[in-house]
């Protein structure tokens, strides 16, 4: 099984990176491959709301902005499952993850529907007070719902729970691969 791990934080050695790596370790332990993408290192522009609100996203299922979105989108389509790992900013997704999801959702929900039923994991890493991790997960799940993607599970990680939630993420990655292979019943 090939799991695309899309993660967003500018820090390569912070809480979010550790969470993404724990998940990936579990995926590998189960015999899967983890395709890691740090969105902050990619070129992801924000939606310009072409035309009177909708552009080619609705008419043709692609975005006119020529950046890294389409390549990642293609990798999502090929992946057996997708894990989203974001730092929590302002009780929400990071601006980079948000920009990516905003444009992806337009193409998916309005035209392509090609990610519908694709299984996903959502992880929100709130490294400050820990406040907002739950809100971030709720926001994320809403976006997935618009695209008819299914969140199989979700996890808040804070600096207070990381000693037990980071190891749990490894198990989560492992079981995600097993469930993809054996079914989610
Ligand atoms: C703009 C900004 C907003 C933030 N908002 C929150 C927040 O609402 N709740 C929280 O617990 N931490 C917040 N933080 C802290 C981040 O969640 C923390 O940096 C996060 O764990 C990312 O960690 P990492 O950079 O080590 O990956 C914020 C950080 C920034 C830069």
Image (cartoon, rainbow, N blue to C red):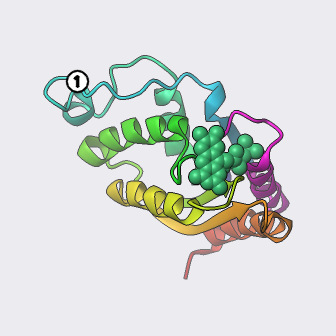
Could you say whether the residue bearing mark 1 is in a helix, strand or loop? loop
The residue that appears at 60% across and 62% down in the rendered structure is: 131
Name the residue that disc number 1 marks: 50
- Position of residue 83 relative to residue 135, above or below, is above
> In which quadrant will I find the N terminus?
bottom right
Position of residue 105 in the picture relative to residue 75 (left or right):
left
The residue that appears at 51% across and 37% down in the rendered structure is: 95
> In which quadrant will I find the C terminus?
bottom right
The residue that appears at 41% across and 27% down in the rendered structure is: 46
Outermost residue, left side: 52
Residue 4 visible here: no
Position of residue 68 in the picture relative to residue 25 (left or right):
left
x, y percent for residue 116: 38, 56
In which quadrant of the rendered view does residue 55 lie?
top left
x, y percent for residue 17: 76, 45
x, y percent for residue 52: 13, 27
Is 75 a magenta residue? no
Position of residue 167 in the picture relative to residue 41 (left or right):
right
Q: Give the range drawn in magenta.
A: 4-33
Position of residue 29 in the picture relative to residue 117 (left or right):
right
Residue placed most toward the observer, 154 or 80: 154
């Amino acid at each position: 099984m090939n799991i695309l791990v899309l993660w967003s934080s500018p820090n390569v050695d912070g809480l979010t990176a550790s969470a993404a790596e724990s998940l990936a370790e579990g995926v590998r332990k189960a015999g899967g491959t983890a395709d890691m993408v740090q969105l902050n290192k990619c070129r992801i522009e924000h939606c310009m709301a072409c035309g009177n609100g909708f552009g080619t996203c609705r008419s043709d299922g692609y975005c006119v902005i020529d950046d890294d979105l389409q390549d990642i989108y293609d990798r999502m389509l090929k992946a057996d499952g997708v894990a989203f790992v974001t730092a929590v900013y302002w009780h929400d997704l990071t601006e980079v993850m948000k920009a990516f999801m905003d444009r992806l959702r337009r193409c998916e929900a309005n035209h392509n529907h090609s990610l519908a039923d694709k299984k996903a994991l959502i992880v929100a890493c709130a490294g400050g007070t820990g406040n907002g991790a739950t809100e971030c997960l709720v926001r994320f799940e809403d976006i997935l719902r618009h695209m008819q993607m299914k969140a199989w599970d979700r996890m808040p990680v804070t600096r207070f729970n990381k000693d037990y939630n980071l190891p749990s993420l490894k198990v989560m990655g492992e079981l995600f691969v097993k469930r993809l292979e054996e079914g989610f019943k």
